[in-house]
Image (cartoon, rainbow, N blue to C red):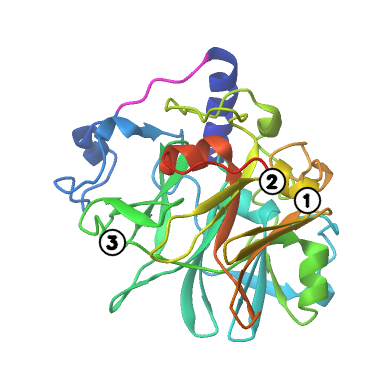
Amino acid sequence: MMYWIRVLCFAAATSLGALPALADPEAWKAEGWNLTDFGKTAIPWAEIKSGGPPKDGIPSIDQPLFQPVAETEDLAANDPVISVEIAGDARAYPLRVMIWHEIVNDTMGGLPVTVTYCPLCNAAITFDRRVKTRVLDFGTTGKLRNSDLVMYDRQTESWWQQFTGEAIVGEMTGTALRMLPARLESFSDFKSRHPGGKVLIPNDPAARNYGSNPYVGYDSSSNPFLYQGDLPEGIDPMERVVVARLEQQAPVIISLSLLRQSRTLREGALEFSWKPGQSSAVDEPKIAEGRDVGTVEVYRISPSNERELVPYDVTFAFVAHAFHPDIKIRQQL
């Protein structure tokens, strides 16, 4: 039942305006946040909103199950998947599953990882879940900041911003997770690239209406859900943009519409490319029937012309502006 609370809140907010939210550490303690050190924070409390579900109301997947690509029959060719490859271990995390769980704690090629998806931001980001000598496990707080998923680690109950990978509340405040290169691509592309790969499947296929989209019409929404910040100028806040991230450097942000027109773009050492064939997960009632938003890849090109996949994200313009207000979104050649 808790999985539908955010859906009902989404429907109410889009028809009636933003919902009121209580931003108060004392109230949060009463919700069960007994380990969180609210004496440490990097943000104003008012920026935290309730997304509807309580702590772990949207349950992470902590013991993921997989099946071989060759045995996967319930995914359409254009179904979107988060594709990760580490040390020859290639896995696809379909958004038809991720949209209901948002976080998967996994280990790939011997590396502990957290694969995340925030439907309200369309943000698909994979992290190394090691912090120094500790391995963290992540869950959902039920909170949002700038409409983005706020995660928590179960070891310290610190709160983490999914879009940036930074701890914003609690003992770990100021710590940042390392983002890992991953693709948001069609199942067809993953299958062609990794015929021996594995595909995440639900632990209990009957527990959710997997394959359906609980955020129907979000792609065409005029207002982001529970977002009250500044909107970007000169671009629709719900237009998709590509955010390429390099360590120790400011992100590079370009509009998806520009990339769709040119198919390939260079921005310094970065090469952006786009091709059709992937459906939007937050459009039609069935994810596989969502409009074609295509697949993006971002590579760093070395002086010797070697190509290295870099961490990138295909999100909405309002999200990129909220977290990187000083970075201009490139919209012209």
Residue 307 seen in the figure: yes
Name the residue type under label 3: Thr
Mark in front: 1 vs 3:
1
Total numbered labels placed on residues in the image: 3
Examine the rendered structure and indicate whether residue 216 appears above or below residue 304.
above
* Pick the front one: 123 or 332: 332
Q: Which residues are magenta?
A: 17-22
Residue located 62% across and 33% down the image: 238
> Within 10 angstroms of label 1, few (less than 14), some, or many (20 or more) residues?
few
Disc 1 target residue:
262
Q: Residue furthest left?
A: 39
In which quadrant of the rendered image does the N terminus lie?
top right
- Mark 2 near mark 1, Cβ–Cβ under 8 Å? yes
What is the spatial separation of the Cα atoms under label 2 and label 3, in whole angstroms? Answer: 36 Å
Disc 3 target residue:
175
Image location of residue 78, percent across then percent down: 82, 55
* Pick the front one: 205 or 61: 61
Which label sits on residue 333?
2
Of the numbered discs 2 and 3, the one sitting upstream in the chain is 3
